[in-house]
Amino acid sequence: MLRRSETVWLQGGREVAVHDTRLEELLDAVRTGKIQLPDFQRDWKWDDGRIRSLLATVTQEFPLGVIMSLETGGTAPQFKPRPLAGTQVPAGTPPEHLLLDGQQRLTALYQALVAQQPVETKDSRDNDISVWYYIDIVKATGSEEDREDAILAVPASRILRRSPSRGDVLDLSSRDKECAAGLFPLNLCFDRRTLRAWQRAYEDRDEARERHWENFDAGVLKQIEQFQVPWVKLRKDTSTEAVCVVFERVNTGGLNLNVFELLTATYAGNRAYADEHGKEFNLRGDWERIKDGLAEKYPVLEKLASLEFLQALALVLSYRRRRQFLAEHPNSSEAPSIRCKRKDLLALPLSDYREWTPKITHAFAWASEFLSEQCVFREAELPYQTQLVPLATIRVILGDAIDTPQARKKIVQWYWCGVFGELYGSTTDTRFAKDIEQVIDWIEGGSEPDTVTEASFQEQRLRSMSSKLSAAYKGVFALLLQHGCYDWYASASPISGESLVAEAVDFRLVFPKAWFDSAALKNAHVTSVVNKTPLSTRAAKTIGTRAPAVYLDMFARESGAQPEWVDDLVESHFIDPKTLRANDYEAFYRDRTEQLLGLIESAMGKPVVRAASAASAI
């Protein structure tokens, strides 16, 4: 018999007991709707292999794992419920518990052991299938190692063609045929009247079957009947934030609970948020409308997340509360802080969401236009997705005042300090709060924000950057575009957002790897951003494996341009063409390093940290 004596610790050190509960009782609660899902739970998705493995676990009384639920009816915001997949719970049936962890297991067990309809699942090739689950009576009472092999998935027609070419067809379309085959339908496990009738029909076929059934009843059916599941019941007064934390820690499906989904379920489950016609507010649908509208017009916002949208809203609201408090209590040290942590997001009133959503949406559109001016056109070239949040928040708070020349200059400097200081890679919610207050104060005449004063870029970092995942790497790409670099095919205009896509512009090696191999040179910084520059696919094909002096002449011949014109195009990339025509990598690397450092200094508005020696090793 399965026995558990465990505790689960919630915030504040509160202890919650684990209750051993019979599987039959749990599945009956699922059937009647006493146990339902909160609407934020993902859909059931287990495949046939996992279902059969689970059924084998139950028939052998192996541990199933804890399930967790939240009692309904508390004072905390309630979530919209929905029945588990496959049940026939009448609409509007109020649940007693909302299942936080265990959906996949309970749904699979309910559909296989209780439901009087085929289980809709998938096979090993991810094809949709509709099956009944049977267990081979004789095989199941043999070695326990064969238990999973004893469980069979049979098509909804109850006819299984195991080898059509040899006419091997298993027909279970009637009780008599099931008994003849010795295959027991598992969805009769808890239907005792039908189960006994099936037993009598099975035993009546010959005397040996009485012994088979006796072994099957004791070794399989009794195990299922007596099977117990550890059940953690969170009290109805558990806070929404605690529910979110617990879900993320114990959910065995491996999926994190999105705060936006939790807030969606909260709004949908609260009648106070319904409109005058009683229709619940669909936060998810509203967000999809906003996201699709922004992404369609602004490619850089393609991966804007619901969490980032909510963070901007929470920052705006908490900033306003703090400012109002300080205006009323100028000498107080107890002003509320600027925050956008999970607790703050979960407490956002729908009225504030509705009021501020248009302004937040407009601010993200403004942020996209700002980034376009910095020559960050697409999500793939965006140094920090997270930096969109304070950028949009500051725009909401300052309004049009952010577009004055003085304010714009400071915003640009703050942005590039964040990128090249690589300050938005972690603990972003804390930096968000500081930046919101400090950048706004700076624009209004105060001192520089921490993001500007703390930002530091070192020469050695430039040499080591070679990954597209680096924010500073993407920053160099954008700065080169911003300063009007041309493609090397005698382009009439600098690379733009349109030509970036049309001509498949990407960072390409200036000195190809093959050149180093042919020259028998080894260099640790071949793939450094210093040896890369934005060029089209067409230009990259001309470069190929050739030495720079060779491919520069080819650019001139193929485009019909004078060599001097090609040199001008090269110079637009902060590269000295003389070093390329001489195939002098060391001279090229030293010069390009210095020019790129100057470019970064200009963007950050402060000196970078150079190596001890100007002639440092390359």
Image (tube, rainbow, N blue to C red):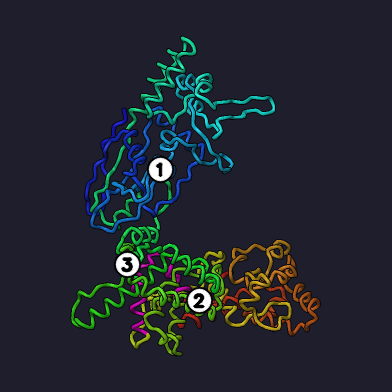
Q: Is residue 462 visible?
A: no
Report which residue position mark 2 lands on. Answer: 368
Q: Position of residue 207 (x, y in %)?
A: 46, 9
| Residue for point 25% across, 80% down | 324
SS class, disc 3:
loop
Q: Which mark is residue 348?
A: 3
Q: How far is disc 1 from disc 2 in space, using C-alphas? A: 48 Å
Is 296 or 553 nearer to us in this picture? Answer: 296
Look at the image and say whether residue 440 sits in the magenta stretch: yes
Residue 199 appears at what percent x and percent y? Answer: 43, 19
Judged by its main secondary structure, the magenta piece is: helix
Residue under label 1: 88
Identified by mark 1, the residue type is Gln
Tell me the quarter of the image containing the C terminus: bottom right
Mark positioned earlier in the residue sequence (3 or 1): 1
Q: Which label sits in the foreground, 3 or 1?
A: 1
Q: Position of residue 270 (x, y in %)?
A: 31, 60
